[in-house]
């Protein structure tokens, strides 16, 4: 058997494969930027170029804060800390997560920045690798909320097993609700069947004067309306709502965003749970119109 030897053929000029750094990084899905010490963009891959502000023909040589965010000066606290500045100050690789606002939604960008040094070890520029981590951040927030809710329920269960007095049980329940809602103002009003009125039994973040001054009948004020209808009530600003029974007390207390929820045991009405904030519409962190909720 004759063994055939095949020799490698040299690549001709026409067959030469042209590969450049730009071609390589343009295939990277993450945004990649190189920014010099003067905040000027000196390199960007295609993913990064797609995010530059409209109306800018070429971002090269222009300030990063201008082409990325349309700002006239570098990003600073409290907006957020500039990754470039942090790398120049520390000389180390840093990673930050920045919230970004886009029309109709909010996103989160994970930015990893590391220094590029010259032969003498001096930092000449900074490489930024940017990745959209919105989905991961939302999942993390969801898991964290579920953890807090389970922890709060666990605390309630443990506390109830060792408590026999009503005030202690109600206080644990109120604290757990406030923890879940990330609030610090609230209270529980119990219904007195004899007088047919609602009054605070336990409260947190409210003055004693306010708590003692609230004594409402069914159908009267916000809590009385909730007791009458059996529906939760959410207000952007209770101080501006005409349904309040004690406007002077509410104004003095400085209450704004307000939610009132009926408390029941099977078919029996027990009272009302109130949660409030001194900042309008801040209970849920987003805007709601005054509404009745079927909870």
Image: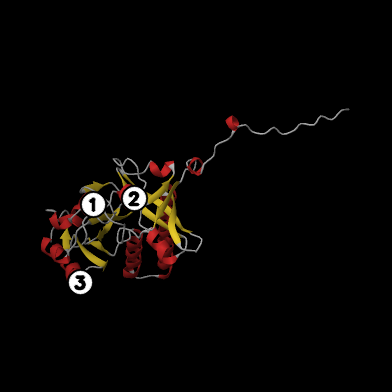
> What distance separates the C-alpha of mark 1 from that of mark 3?
24 Å
Q: Residue furthest top?
A: 1
- Model colouring: secondary structure
Q: Earlier in the sequence, mark 2 or mark 3?
A: 2
Q: Is residue 227 above or below residue 199?
A: above
Nearest to viewer (mark 2 / mark 3): 2
Q: Earlier in the sequence, mark 1 or mark 3?
A: 3
Callout 2: helix, strand or loop? Answer: strand
Q: Earlier in the sequence, mark 2 or mark 1?
A: 2
Instruction: Give the number of the disc on residue 234.
Output: 1
Q: Residue furthest front?
A: 13
Q: How many marks?
A: 3
- The quadrant in which residue 161 appears is bottom left
Q: Horizontal placement of 107 versus 196: left or right?
A: right
- The quadrant in which residue 269 appears is bottom left
Evaluate if marks 2 and 1 touch, with contact meaning CB atoms under 8 Å apart: no
| Residue bearing mark 2 | 100
């Amino acid at each position: 058997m004759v063994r055939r030897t095949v020799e490698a053929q040299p690549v001709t000029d026409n067959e030469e494969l042209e590969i450049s750094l730009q071609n390589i990084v343009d295939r990277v899905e993450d945004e990649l930027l190189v920014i010099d010490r003067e905040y000027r963009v000196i390199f960007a891959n295609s993913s990064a170029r797609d995010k530059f502000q409209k109306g800018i023909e070429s971002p090269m040589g222009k300030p990063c804060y201008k082409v990325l965010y349309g700002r006239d000066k570098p990003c600073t606290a409290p907006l957020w800390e500039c990754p470039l500045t942090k790398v120049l100050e520390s000389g180390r690789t840093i990673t930050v997560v920045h919230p970004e606002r886009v029309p109709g939604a909010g996103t989160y960008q994970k930015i990893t920045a590391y220094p590029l040094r010259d032969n003498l070890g001096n930092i000449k520029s900074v490489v930024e690798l940017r990745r959209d981590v919105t989905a991961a951040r939302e999942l993390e927030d969801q898991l964290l909320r579920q953890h807090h809710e389970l922890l709060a329920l666990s605390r309630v269960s443990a506390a109830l097993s060792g408590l026999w007095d009503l005030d202690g049980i109600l206080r644990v329940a109120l604290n757990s609700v406030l923890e879940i809602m990330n609030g610090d103002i609230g209270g529980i009003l119990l219904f007195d069947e004899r007088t047919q009125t609602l009054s605070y039994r336990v409260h947190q973040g409210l003055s004693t004067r306010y708590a003692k001054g609230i004594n409402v009948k069914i159908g009267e004020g916000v809590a009385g309306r909730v007791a009458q209808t059996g529906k939760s009530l959410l207000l952007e600003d209770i101080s501006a709502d005409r349904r309040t029974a004690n406007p002077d007390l509410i104004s003095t207390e400085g209450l704004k965003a307000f939610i009132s929820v009926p408390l029941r045991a099977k078919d029996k009405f027990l009272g009302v749970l109130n949660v409030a904030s001194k900042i309008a519409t801040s209970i849920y962190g987003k805007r709601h119109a005054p509404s009745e909720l079927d909870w």
